[in-house]
């Protein structure tokens, strides 16, 4: 591939260049971070140096049972997200396929999605108590509406010509869902799940604010009380690492299920 092509809109790049550019962005961040901390431009209270973060991570894993916090948080986020997907994906497909369902449900979901999940915590505590159900409910509430509406948009974008052609070939209305709408929507739905799984993690700290005794969000809030900025950053970085791993898994599944669709701008 000629070098000039890398600046062409939507042009593919080699896998090596893609990986190199991705790593470069992290190296730039590390360089700026090191410059600010080792150069004494920022107090360690506000931003500890990279080596202090590594030391804190080792301490948290060896002395504060951080693995348990990670597993607890992964369980909570996964439960809330899976519940949102189980309900939201079929509902979104129906809303995107049938105007009747769109008219019935979309205005209500559009109204509710602007309400912050954190504002509902007192109600969730009143309705569900302070156990695991309340924390899963916060993550579900923060994820469900966006997920459903995005699946609806994906389904609505299925070409009308495909559906009309299916009818011309004698496909029944019921079979159109299974043989046309679902196959055409699946790539977009999987991408929507990847994006909204990331959103689910953004509600973790909110979900673990009240009556939690474990989890990454709990650890971050406890560290804030004792001004342990290094522990806070470790917790945030672990969430970011988990997010990258989830992204990689979803992209791997995407590439295996839909190999005919170019993904990520990588060539070969």
Image (tube, rainbow, N blue to C red):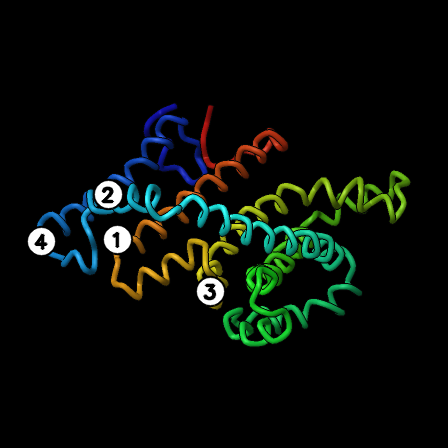
Dot 3: element: helix
Dot 4: element: loop
Instruction: Tell whether 229 sits left or right of 135.
Output: left
The residue beneath circle 4 is: 40
CA gap between label 4 and label 3 equals 33 Å
Q: Please indicate, yes or no, whether residue 141 appears anywhere in the rendered image.
A: no
CA gap between label 1 and label 4 equals 16 Å
Q: Nearer the viewer, mark 4 or mark 3?
A: 3
Q: Residue at x 35, y 29 (%)?
A: 17
Q: Nearer the viewer, residue 121 or 212?
A: 212
Dot 1: element: helix
Given contact means CB atoms under 8 Å apart, are the residues at marks 3 and 1 in contact?
Answer: no
The residue beneath circle 1 is: 230
Q: Earlier in the sequence, mark 4 or mark 2?
A: 4
Q: Nearer the viewer, mark 2 or mark 3?
A: 2
CA gap between label 2 and label 3 equals 27 Å
Q: Earlier in the sequence, mark 2 or mark 3?
A: 2
Q: Earlier in the sequence, mark 4 or mark 3?
A: 4
Q: Residue at x 44, y 50 (%)?
A: 69
Count neighbours of disc 1 (C-alpha within 10 A) and say few if under 14, some if 14 to 19, many if 20 or more.
Answer: many
The numbered disc on residue 206 is 3
Count neighbours of disc 2 (C-alpha within 10 A) and say few if under 14, some if 14 to 19, many if 20 or more.
Answer: few
Q: Nearer the viewer, residue 257 or 215?
A: 215
The residue beneath circle 2 is: 55
Q: In the displayed structure, would residue 47 be above or below residue 267?
A: below
Q: Earlier in the sequence, mark 3 or mark 1?
A: 3
Instruction: Tell whether 253 sits left or right of 92.
Output: left
Q: Nearer the viewer, mark 1 or mark 4?
A: 1
Q: Nearer the viewer, residue 107 or 60?
A: 60
Given contact means CB atoms under 8 Å apart, are the residues at marks 4 and 3 in contact?
Answer: no
């Amino acid at each position: 591939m000629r070098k000039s092509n890398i600046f062409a809109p939507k042009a593919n790049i080699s896998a090596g260049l893609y990986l190199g550019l991705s790593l470069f962005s992290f190296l730039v961040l590390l360089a700026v971070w090191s410059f600010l901390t080792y150069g004494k431009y920022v107090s360690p209270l506000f931003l500890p140096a990279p080596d202090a973060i590594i030391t804190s991570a080792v301490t948290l894993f060896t002395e504060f049972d951080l693995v348990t916090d990670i597993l607890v948080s992964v369980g909570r986020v996964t439960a809330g997200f899976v519940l949102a997907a189980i309900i939201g994906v079929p509902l979104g497909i129906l809303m995107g396929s049938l105007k009747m369902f769109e008219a019935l449900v979309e205005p209500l979901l559009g109204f509710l999605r602007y309400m912050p999940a954190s504002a509902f915590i007192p109600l969730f505590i009143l309705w569900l108590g302070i156990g695991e159900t309340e924390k899963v409910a916060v993550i579900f509430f923060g994820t469900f509406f966006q997920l459903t509406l995005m699946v609806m948009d994906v389904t609505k974008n299925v070409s009308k010509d495909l559906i009309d052609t299916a009818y011309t070939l004698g496909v029944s209305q019921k079979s159109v869902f299974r043989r046309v709408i679902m196959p055409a929507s699946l790539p977009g739905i999987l991408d929507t799940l990847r994006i909204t799984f990331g959103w689910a993690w953004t509600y973790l700290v909110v979900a673990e604010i009240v009556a939690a005794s474990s989890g990454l969000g709990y650890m971050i809030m406890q560290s804030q009380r004792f001004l342990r900025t290094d522990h806070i950053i470790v917790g945030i970085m672990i969430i970011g690492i988990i997010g990258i791993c989830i992204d990689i898994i979803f992209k791997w599944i995407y590439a295996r299920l839909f190999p005919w669709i170019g993904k990520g701008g990588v060539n070969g």
